[in-house]
Amino acid sequence: MKALLLIDIQSDFIPGGALAVAGGDQIIALTNQLQPLFELVLATQDWHPASHKSFASNHPGRQPFETTQLQGLEQVLWPDHCIQGSAGAEFSPQLDMQRVEAIFRKGTDPEIDSYSGFYDNGHLKSTGLAGYLRERGVQQLYLAGLAGDYCVYFTAKDALELGFEVVVIEDATRAIDAEGFGRAKADLLQGGAQLVLSRDLLQQA
Ligand code: VGL
Ligand code: ZN
């Protein structure tokens, strides 16, 4: 059984948002078109308290996109984004949510960031996504969403490690940094992930 996981398609990651990913708006109609090909559609939602330590604003004198150490891990300092209950944390209003059966929130612990939909960056706590997928009999996990070089990449990496077959729908994602995304894709291929284009899936259907 295959599932489609929509990663962080939230207003703050869409042009006009606080941590806009260039072209992020261009994947929404496509992900809506892809949804009917899957028996199960799930979503993740970046969901930070205002006090989150991944925000540059919580480190006096530091600027967004600088790096620091957090819980012994390298951490990019982001602009404030996806604050719990804010408009920017909402799913894009253009995103079809009727078929989304469950939403996995991440990034709620102010002390650690969480790019993957499965675990925080220190792999200290699970979101429950792996157990959910196993209980629903999912073997193949298709990924779409934002951002390709952060949350899509780390979700794919964990999914591979957990033993799922991973398919990244390459044109249904956009990256913050093109070079970083190039490295991420090479790493995922190396780890056994597949990269496909949405037209290949839509033609098969
Ligand atoms: C993300 C940076 C910070 C993402 C989330 O969804 O890729 N990136 N928080
Ligand atoms: Zn975040």
Image: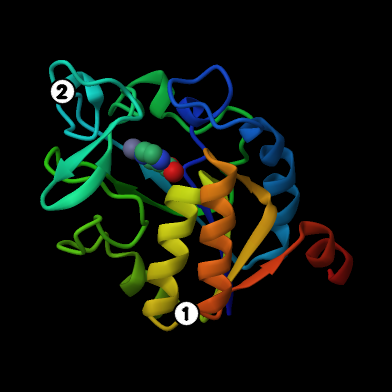
Give the camera-side residue of 40 and 13: 13
On the image, the x and y values in percent for residue 87 come to: 41, 19
Residue type highlighted by circle 1:
Phe
- Picture quadrant where residue 141 is located: bottom right
Residue type highlighted by circle 2:
Asn
Q: Give the residue drawn at x 24%, y 55%.
A: 120
Residue that numbered label 1 is attached to: 164
Q: Give the residue drawn at x 36%, y 56%.
A: 116
On the image, the x and y values in percent for residue 85 come to: 30, 25
Tell me the crowding category of disc 2: few under 14, some 14 to 19, or many 20 or more residues within 10 angstroms, Cα based: some
Tell me the crowding category of disc 1: few under 14, some 14 to 19, or many 20 or more residues within 10 angstroms, Cα based: many
Tell me: 45 left or right of 17. left
Residue 89's place in the image compared with 147, above or below, is above
Tell me: 60 left or right of 143. left
Residue 162's place in the image compared with 63, above or below, is below
Residue 35's place in the image compared with 40, above or below, is above
Residue 120's place in the image compared with 60, above or below, is below
**Secondary-structure class at tag 2:** helix
Residue that numbered label 2 is attached to: 58
Give the camera-side residue of 185 and 142: 185
Q: CA distance from mark 2 to mark 1?
A: 36 Å
